[in-house]
Image: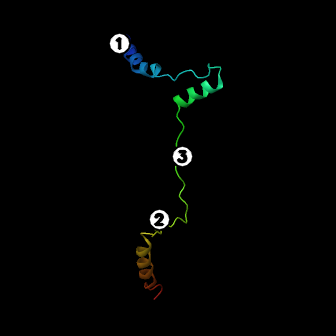
C-alpha cells in the first residue's frame, strides 16, 4: 500500500519536472542568450498612461454624492438636546 502511494505521489509531481525552462545561462553569445530569455519569458507590454486632463474622457461623477447630501440634510434636522 505504501509503495503504491509513493508511486502515485511521484507520478503526480512528474509533469513539473518535464516543464523545466531551457538553460539560457549556458549560452556564451550575449545576443543569443538574450533571445533565449526573451523567448522563455516574453516582455510584458506596458499599458498606456491616461492623463487626468484628457478631454475625451467624461468628468468623474461620484455616485454617492447625492445620497450623502440627503443623509446630511436629514441629520441636520435632528434635535439634539431638546
User: Residue 80 at what x, y percent from top left?
Assistant: 47, 84
* Nearer to me, 32 or 51: 32
Q: Secondary structure at mark 3?
A: loop
Residue in view at x 42 percent, y 16 percent: 10
Q: Give the mark toward the camera: 3 or 1.
A: 3
User: Residue 50 at what x, y percent from top left?
Assistant: 53, 58
Mark 3 or mark 1, earlier in chain: 1
The residue singled out by tag 2 in the image is 57
Q: Residues within 10 Å of mark 2 (few under 14, many from 20)?
A: few
- Per the rendering, the mark at residue 46 is 3
Q: Residues within 10 Å of mark 1 (few under 14, many from 20)?
A: few
Mark 2 or mark 1, earlier in chain: 1
The residue singled out by tag 1 in the image is 4
Q: Disc 2 vs disc 3: Cβ atoms closer than 8 Å?
A: no
Alpha carbons under labels 2 and 1: distance apart: 63 Å
Q: Secondary structure at mark 1?
A: helix
Q: Disc 2 vs disc 1: Cβ atoms closer than 8 Å?
A: no
Alpha carbons under labels 2 and 3: distance apart: 21 Å
Residue in view at x 54 percent, y 46 percent: 46
- Per the rendering, the mark at residue 76 is none
* Nearer to me, 75 or 69: 69
Q: Quadrant of residue 66?
A: bottom left
Amino acid at each position: 500500500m505504501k509503495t503504491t502511494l509513493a508511486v502515485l505521489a511521484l507520478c503526480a509531481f512528474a509533469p513539473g519536472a518535464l516543464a523545466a525552462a531551457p538553460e539560457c545561462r549556458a549560452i556564451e553569445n550575449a545576443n543569443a542568450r538574450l533571445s533565449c530569455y526573451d523567448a522563455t519569458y516574453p516582455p510584458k507590454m506596458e499599458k498606456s498612461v491616461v492623463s487626468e486632463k484628457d478631454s475625451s474622457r467624461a468628468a468623474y461623477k461620484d455616485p454617492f454624492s447625492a445620497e450623502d447630501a440627503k443623509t446630511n440634510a436629514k441629520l441636520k434636522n435632528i434635535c439634539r438636546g431638546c
